[in-house]
Image (spheres, coloured by chain):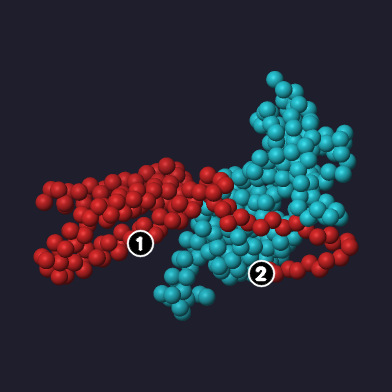
Chain colours: A cyan, B red
């Protein structure tokens, strides 16, 4: 059993003359309980301190350590080196994002898109604090709980060919999070979100490749959320067509 | 959503990788997806073929015979066999995806995906049997 494994790490140094990223190989220990992130941290601590990558919690909660491991978008804190024996393990920055340095990608586009779908509870009128909390039954919470598990790791964006081809597409996680608030019994912002989401850049950009759901480490199922939202938007459109004097 | 970031010494150049023209060939899931999209052309051909049949019937017995001759041509048989394979692929892939898009609740409980896909297959089988009965049984 090999106790060491080779990491092929993508290096991009914007200050250097080479415009293309290159691969650098590092040999790291392959312990039973080591994940790819442990390997990268070993490189950073012992072999090459200039290697740049994002990470924080090491336990699949913060969503910062998403990278492409052997071509698949993965949380590197949850991807065991042992599963890739005998190696080598190719570590690259997430696809479909501009690379800032080595394994770090620019996530501003996602952050801006996320705010456009208003991922917070929208109330037409806030009730006074003296009236107490907004109560919710367990069944009402179950409606949206799955979508609330999203940790904004952006693996779904890396897996989505539509986002790669059309950067204006709002993308899987943002739509799933919009759906998370739409399905919340305390929320009243569905109409506001519909105007953003029922555009070509919104749900209709999605062609149901389904890879976002496959790579999601938190089982959010963004593809399902988008298809369900397509149904909602179609019904809304039909309602407006048949009853133009309706509520809208 | 167009956000342009200006270049500055503190904002070094980013590396942007262009999406390859052959992006759909590098991953099995992407390839299956592109094939599923491609099936729509074959579905359209079957619709056109049906319309051609209806049009032939409009021209009476002679028109129908001409259509049968056309349909028996080896090239047409080949095209229709290929089309049939693609249409079956179209149906199976979409039926399998149906549970993801449809959330049906009965008595507060979510109906399992297998049942939703299964009902699609059952409907398909039922229509096929009725059609077979119409053609063979009559």
Task: Give residue A74's quadrant in the image.
Answer: top right
B85 sits to left or right of A68: left
Front position in the image: A18 or A248: A18
Task: Give residue B65's quadrant in the image.
Answer: bottom left
Which residue is depicted at the point 61% across and 45% down? A215
Percent position of residue B50, x then y: 26, 62
Q: Are marks 2 and 1 in contact (CB under 8 Å)?
A: no
As drawn, B9 above or below A241: above
As drawn, A78 above or below A248: above
Q: Do pointers 2 and 1 mark residues of a single chain? A: no
Q: Pointer 1: what residue?
A: B44
Element under label 2?
loop
Q: Pointer 2: what residue?
A: A125
Mark 2 or mark 1, whichever is nearer to me:
1
Q: Is residue B96 visible?
A: yes
Crowd rating for badge 2 (residues with CA inside 10 Å; few <14, some 14–19, many 20+): few
Percent position of residue A53, x then y: 80, 46
B38 sits to left or right of A87: left
Front position in the image: A58 or B80: B80
Q: Which part of the image, by quadrant, shows the N terminus of chain A?
A: top right
Percent position of residue A75, x then y: 69, 42
Give the residue at the far bottom of this rendering. A245
Front position in the image: A10 or A213: A10
Chain under numbered label 1:
B
As drawn, A177 above or below A55: below
Which residue is depicted at the point 79% across and 67% down? B5
Chain under numbered label 2:
A
Element under label 1?
helix
A85 sits to left or right of A56: left
Q: CA distance from mark 2 to mark 1?
A: 50 Å
Percent position of residue A48, x then y: 87, 39
Which residue is depicted at the point 15% across and 70% down? B59
């Amino acid at each position: 059993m090999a106790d060491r494994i080779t990491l092929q790490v993508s290096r991009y140094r914007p200050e250097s003359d080479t415009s293309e990223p290159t691969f650098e190989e590092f040999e790291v220990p392959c312990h039973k309980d080591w994940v790819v992130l442990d390997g990268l941290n070993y490189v950073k601590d012992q072999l090459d301190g200039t290697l740049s990558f994002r990470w924080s919690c090491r336990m699949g909660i913060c969503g910062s350590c998403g990278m492409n491991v052997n071509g698949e978008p993965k949380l590197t804190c949850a991807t065991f080196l042992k599963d890739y024996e005998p190696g080598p393990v190719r570590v690259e920055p997430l696809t479909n994002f501009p690379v800032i340095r080595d394994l770090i990608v620019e996530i501003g586009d996602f952050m801006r898109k996320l705010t456009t779908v208003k991922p917070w509870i929208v109330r037409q009128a806030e009730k006074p604090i003296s009236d107490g909390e907004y109560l919710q039954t367990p069944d009402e919470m179950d409606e949206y709980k799955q979508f609330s598990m999203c940790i904004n790791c952006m693996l779904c964006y890396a897996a989505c060919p539509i986002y790669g081809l059309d950067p204006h597409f709002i993308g899987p996680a943002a739509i799933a999070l919009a759906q998370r608030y739409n399905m919340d019994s305390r929320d009243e912002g569905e109409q506001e979100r519909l105007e953003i989401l029922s555009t070509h850049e919104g749900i209709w950009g999605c062609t149901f490749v389904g890879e976002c759901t496959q790579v999601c480490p938190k089982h959010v199922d963004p593809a399902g959320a988008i298809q369900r939202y397509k149904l909602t938007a179609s019904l809304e459109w039909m309602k407006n067509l048949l009853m133009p004097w309706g509520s809208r | 959503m167009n956000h342009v970031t200006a270049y500055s010494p503190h904002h070094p150049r980013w590396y942007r990788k262009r999406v390859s023209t052959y992006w759909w060939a590098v991953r099995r899931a992407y390839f299956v997806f592109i094939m599923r999209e491609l099936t729509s052309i074959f579905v359209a051909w079957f619709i056109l073929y049906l319309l051609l049949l209806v049009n032939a019937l409009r021209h009476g017995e002679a028109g129908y015979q001409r259509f049968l001759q056309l349909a028996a041509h080896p090239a047409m048989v080949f095209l229709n066999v290929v089309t049939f394979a693609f249409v079956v692929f179209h149906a199976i892939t979409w039926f399998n995806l149906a549970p993801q898009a449809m959330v049906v609740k009965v008595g507060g409980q979510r109906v399992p995906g297998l049942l939703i896909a299964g009902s699609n297959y059952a409907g398909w089988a039922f229509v096929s049997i009725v059609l077979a009965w119409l053609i063979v049984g009559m």
